[in-house]
Structures are given as C-alpha cells and as structure tokens.
Image (cartoon, rainbow, N blue to C red):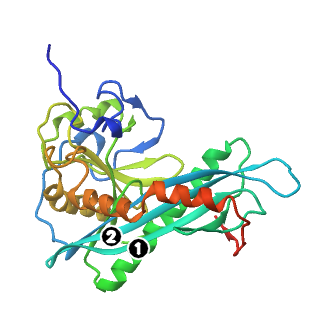
C-alpha cells in the first residue's frame, strides 16, 4: 500500500481539505491574465529581487475564557455573552536579528445585552464590547465574529506601530491569515496556510503539482465578496503530494499588475528561508518559524485560562459595577 502522511498535527486539521483531487472547485471569480496570459501559464522560478530591510511578521491569537448568560433584575430572558482574550504582535526580522517588536493583549465581554457592564475581577478586566445582533445568525456566531474583528483591528494597530518605530519604507509586512479588511496596508502580503477550495480553473489547475520548492504560480485576481491579487508558492519540503508545502499569498487589489508581480517575486526570495521543518513544528513547512514563535509567545501572554475562569465565577457572585460601553 502506497500512502503519505500529512506533516501537520491532526489537532489543526489538515493543510488541505482532503486530497488534491477532492478539493472543491470554488465559485469565486478568477482572472488569470494578470501577470501572464492563461495560455502561457507555467511555474515561475525565483528571480533576483531587492531584499527588504526587514520582514515584519504579524499574527494574533484569541481564546474564549467563558460563556455567560446575562440577565436583568426583572427576570427576563437572558442574553448570551462571551468573555474573550485576544493578543496580537509583530516579529521583526532584520539585520539585528529576530525580535518581538510590538505585542498587545486585550480582553473583552462580547454581548448584545444593552444593560451589560465591564467585568473587573481579581485576575482580569473584560471591557464591554456591545455587539449588534444579526438576523438569521446564531448569537454564538455573532459574538465569535465580533471577537475576530477586534483581533483583526488589533493586528493592524501593532503592525502600524511596528512600522512607525522603524521609520523605513523598504520593509515587507507578512500577515498570517487572510488580507481582508487590511488591503490598505502598504508593502503587505498575507499568508494562507491551509486550503479549503481549489481556486484555479481546470485548464491551469495542474500547475500546482508541477511547482518545485521556491517556485510559484503566476499572479491572478481572485474575487469572492472582495477582490485581491493572489498566487501559490511551494515552500521547501519533501514533496509527497501535489499540495505539499503549498501556501497561498494575497496582496492588495489596489496595486498595478506589475506591482503585484514584483511583490510576488519578493515573497519567493524572502519567505522560503523561514519555512519550518517537521521535527520542530507540527505544521511544517507552512507555519513559518517567526509566526510559530510569535504564536507561542502570544498564547502565553493570554494568561492561565483556569485562573481567569475561576475569577469570573467568583465575580458572578457579587454585584457588578459598570464602567462604560464600547461598541464592537
């Protein structure tokens, strides 16, 4: 029996949905004629490009500390609430070495209950983030999305602060995750580690299997509920299947096609050296070393979940003191 084993830790799912042959075809709008005409598509080899003065890797983590039911003194129906901790940071890789440039941790109480208040406990403070309910969307999903939006906003904040501290205009910002909502950041790409759908049409879809380490597809324009330029890149790895070591990279649709292609060339020369190895990372090679290290640091900074949960339980037994409302 011939088979291969996905290098990713099963706890994270897989780097692709099932196998290369069973990835669902996407209904997204795709324009192939950006960098090359579709008829001339072939793997793009690395080229000599200018090296950025620094590569800034941005990532964030979130955690639900507790789920709450928030009532009022009249004894009416209770509303759902979520106490969440989230953190974002930047690892700067430059001539001085790799170091955490900026890191922020925040906590929020996400709920649609208009009479809810901030939660101040012995071991944590959760600021009220009043969230608007969405018809047809389950409350748990609404609150989870509100938490995710706050995390995305925090990632933009730490990225801007890291760039302001450097005062250079020749760096490269790499965001772990989709670029949506952050397309206005300059010199920025996002890294998609896992794949749930095949975006390339059948006539060029086999190019993924022909990529060698360090090679990429031509740039194409992808449109779903929003547009972005994107391309696939194979990171250094043992190639056991068509999708081994494949990441998808996105950049702003506001760029000219030649600017997007130039950015794609820069990622070929910049990102492969940061690819992780299976004996050091269970999501190798897609989980780049700076991002993996940053994730560990961020999760540590979220605090002990058991301590926070007990603190919330104790706080639930005493009267609450409101300290303001912040719209999510």
The kind of secondary structure element at disc 2 is strand
Q: Quadrant of the N terminus?
A: top left
Residue 121 coordinates in the image, percent (x, y): 59, 68
Residues marked 1 and 2 touching at CB (< 8 Å): yes
Left/right placement of residue 240 relative to residue 325 reads left
Q: How many marks?
A: 2
Residue 23 coordinates in the image, percent (x, y): 36, 29
Left/right placement of residue 289 relative to residue 145 reads left
Q: Quadrant of the C terminus?
A: bottom right
- Compare residues 97 and 314 and report the one nearer the observer: 314
Question: Distance of mark 1 from mark 2, alpha carbons?
Answer: 7 Å
Residue 253 coordinates in the image, percent (x, y): 42, 60
Residue 162 image-quadrant placement: bottom left
- Residue extending farthest top: 1
Residue found 45% across the figure and 74% down from its top: 157
Circle 2: is it few (<14), some (14-19), or many (20+) Cα within 10 Å? many
In the picture of the structure, the residue carrying the numbered disc 2 is: 90
Residue 216 coordinates in the image, percent (x, y): 21, 48
User: Does residue 148 appear anywhere in the picture?
Assistant: no
- Compare residues 194 and 21 and report the one nearer the observer: 194
Q: In the rendered view, would you say 185 is above or below 96?
A: above
The kind of secondary structure element at disc 1 is helix
- Compare residues 150 and 305 and report the one nearer the observer: 305
In the picture of the structure, the residue carrying the numbered disc 1 is: 158
Q: In the rendered view, would you say 265 is above or below 27?
A: below
């Amino acid at each position: 029996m011939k088979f291969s084993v996905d290098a990713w830790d099963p706890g994270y799912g897989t780097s692709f949905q099932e196998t290369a042959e069973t990835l669902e075809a996407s209904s997204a709008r795709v324009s192939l004629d950006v960098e090359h005409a579709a008829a001339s598509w072939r793997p793009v080899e690395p080229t000599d490009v200018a090296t950025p003065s620094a590569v800034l890797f941005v990532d964030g983590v979130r955690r639900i500390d507790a789920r709450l039911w928030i009532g009022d003194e009249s004894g009416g129906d209770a509303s759902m609430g979520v106490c969440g901790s989230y953190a974002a940071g930047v690892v700067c890789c430059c001539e001085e070495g790799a170091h955490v440039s900026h890191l922020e941790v925040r906590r929020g109480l996400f709920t649609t209950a208009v009479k809810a208040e901030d939660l101040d406990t012995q071991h944590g403070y959760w600021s009220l983030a009043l969230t608007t309910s969405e018809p047809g969307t389950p409350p748990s999903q609404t609150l989870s999305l509100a938490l995710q939006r706050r995390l995305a906003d925090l990632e933009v904040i730490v990225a801007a602060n890291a760039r302001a501290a450097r005062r250079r205009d020749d760096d490269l910002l790499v965001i772990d995750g989709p670029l949506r909502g952050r397309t206005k950041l300059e010199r920025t790409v996002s890294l998609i580690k896992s794949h749930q759908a095949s975006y390339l049409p059948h006539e060029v879809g086999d190019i993924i299997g022909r990529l060698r380490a360090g090679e990429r597809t031509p740039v194409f324009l992808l449109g779903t509920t929003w547009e972005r330029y994107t391309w696939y890149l194979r990171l250094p790895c043992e190639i056991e299947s068509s999708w081994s070591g494949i990441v998808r990279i996105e950049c702003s649709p506001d760029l000219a096609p030649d600017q997007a292609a130039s950015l794609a060339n820069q990622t070929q020369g910049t990102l492969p050296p940061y690819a992780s190895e299976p004996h050091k990372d269970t999501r190798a090679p897609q989980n780049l070393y700076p991002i993996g290290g940053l994730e560990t640091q961020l999760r540590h900074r979220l605090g002990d979940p058991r301590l926070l949960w007990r603190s919330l339980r104790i706080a639930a037994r005493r009267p609450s003191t409101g300290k303001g409302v912040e719209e999510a």
